Image: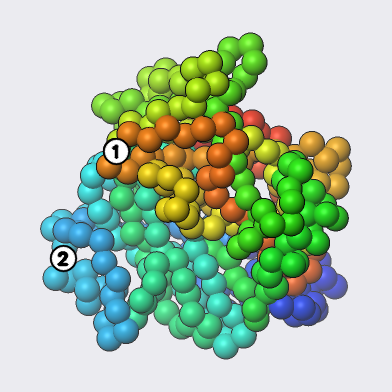
Amino acid sequence: MPVENPQHRATAAAGRPGVVPSQGLVELIHAGAIRAAEPIREDQIQPASIDLRLGAKAFRVRASFLPGRERTVMQRVEGLTMHEFEMGDGAVLEKGCVYIVPLLEDLRLGQEYAAVGNPKSSTGRLDVFTRLITDFGVEFDQVPAGYHGPLYAEIAPRTFSVLVRKGSSLNQLRLRNGEPLRSDDHHKHLQRQHRLVDAALAERDIKNGVPITVDVRGDPETGLIGYRAKAHAGLIDIDRKQHYEIADFWEPVHSDNGSGLILDPGEFYILASKEAVRVPLDYAAEMVAYDTLVGEFRVHYAGFFDPGFGAPEADGQGSRAVLEVRSFEVPFIIEHDQIVGRLVYEPLVDVPHKIYGAGLQSNYQRQGLRLSKHFRS
């Protein structure tokens, strides 16, 4: 892969505890801490994460699992495999099924580095449930400090069947050097300084992250508040952009005179946050797990919020967060301005050389309500 300016590499993965920026990821690749069976491409390196690629083989398994402290992933796969197949130039992953795919990338981390995985934004917006697994792992999406070994993706399409191939990217990895600051007091300071979310928050509102609420009033002219996935839609090629007609896969959802939105059990919705979101250039953000105390639904958050999301240093307009929402066992009314999640901000080791939206092909900068990049605008 192309090497960035060597004079920038001395401090790329050093300095204050925090998330490793793009130039630090390049340094770790050259040091052999991040490796791959095929050359790592420049476009895999994001401002504060690296895209992971599917390998050549996949396993359909009977159930989701964690290997536990005594077994590797492949040792566990041996007793659960229903079907093994080559990815090649294209393979269909059917909705309602669970697959394990070894990834092209693997890790040789030092003790100062740990990592966390997350689905890419486009993956979540298709309701493709994707989690990272490691050998001897006891948690999904968590890579312990000092891990040496392969990486695997567990993939479970829930709404649409998808076509993938060797080299397709469904999830991404963020590396941490040490333990970044994540306290409530720090978030309160950042909200005052940067207005992370465009809302008048009291300090008591900020706990375990900055709250995000949902918009169910929608566009004042059309009343559009979101989309509901069609139950029996066609196949989606995960690598095609701006290709599919929205109406073939989604039904528009409109506001009901401000009386909230009734979520039907088992249905998948794309909604948007009421607030615009901003991520300072030396920070990265992630939506934390949903709190079941606030309603009988979950928001399946996908992807990370990169440094520069919402163009905080330009016009300050921000970009709204897109929410992937699914109800639990009973119908549930979600109200306008209801809290649906919290954003946790972490400092970076250094300002990344790559900034979201600045010369990159960033699909969701300045977004409002937005489906995944696979659909025509």
Q: Is residue 303 above or below residue 162?
A: below
Say few, some or many: other residues with alpha carbon within 10 Å of mark 2 (under 14 / 14 to 19 / 20 or more).
Answer: some
> 214 or 160: nearer the eye?
214
Q: Is residue 363 above or below residue 132?
A: above
Residue 140 as seen in the image, left or right of residue 285: left
Q: Position of residue 57 (x, y in %)?
A: 29, 59
Q: Secondary structure at mark 1?
A: loop
Q: Position of residue 93 (x, y in %)?
A: 28, 45
Residue displayed at 42% across by 79% down:
149
Can you identify the residue that label 1 sits on?
Answer: 330
Q: Is residue 316 above or below residue 259?
A: below
Q: Position of residue 72 (x, y in %)?
A: 29, 79
Residue lying farthest to the top in this orientation: 221
Q: Quadrant of the C terminus?
A: top right
| Image quadrant in which you'd find residue 207 | bottom right
Mark linked to residue 80: 2
Sooner in the amino-acid sequence: mark 2 or mark 1: 2
Q: Quadrant of the N terminus?
A: bottom right
Mark linked to residue 140: none
Residue displayed at 38% across by 44% down:
296
> 151 or 252: nearer the eye?
252
Q: Disc 2 vs disc 1: Cβ atoms closer than 8 Å?
A: no
Q: Position of residue 179 (x, y in %)?
A: 64, 78
The amino acid marked with disc number 2 is Leu
Residue displayed at 59% across by 53% down:
342
